[in-house]
């Protein structure tokens, strides 16, 4: 499953992947990420939402419901 997840992450854009990892893995806040990349918090939220939606679509066949 780890290989499948890695492949799914690689299908995200760099911006989506970076925000997802910083927030969900490194536990950085929206504000910290926004400050780091000089973007608005709403941009962080949008990128994170898009990344999670893409991952859900990509991983759906591998997740038992």
Image (cartoon, helix red, strand yellow):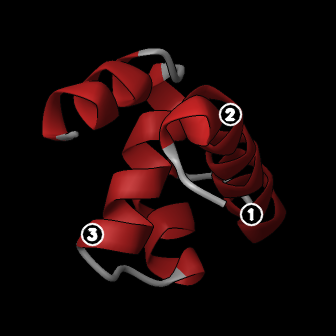
Q: Verify CB contact (< 8 Å) between mark 2 and mark 1.
A: no
Taking the spot 59% from the left edge, 31% from the top edge, the residue there is 61
Q: Which labelled disc corresponds to residue 36?
A: none
| 1 over 28 or under it: above or below | above
Q: Residue furthest left?
A: 2
SS class, disc 1 = helix
Task: Please identify the quadrant where the C terminus is shown.
Answer: bottom right
Quadrant in the rendering for residue 31: bottom right
Residue 38 location in percent, x, y? 55, 52
Q: Position of residue 60 (x, y in %)?
A: 64, 39
Give the structural element (helix, strand or loop) at label 3. helix
Q: CA gap, disc 3 to disc 1?
A: 15 Å
Measured from the top left, where is residue 14 in percent x and y?
Answer: 44, 23
Question: 10 Å neighbourhood of mark 2: few (<14), some, or many (≥20)?
Answer: some
* Residue located at (36% from left, 79% from top): 28
**Going by the image, does 23 lie left or right of 59?**
left
Determine which residue is flagged by label 1: 45
Q: What's the mark number on residue 54?
A: 2
Q: Which residue is mark 3?
A: 25
Q: Residue at x 40, y 59 (%)?
A: 36
């Amino acid at each position: 499953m780890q290989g499948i997840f890695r492949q799914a992450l690689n299908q995200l854009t760099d911006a989506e992947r970076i925000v997802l990892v910083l927030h969900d893995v490194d536990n950085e806040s929206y504000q910290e990420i926004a400050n780091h990349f000089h973007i608005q918090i709403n941009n962080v939220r949008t990128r994170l939402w898009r990344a999670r939606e893409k991952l859900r679509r990509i991983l759906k066949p591998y997740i038992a419901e």
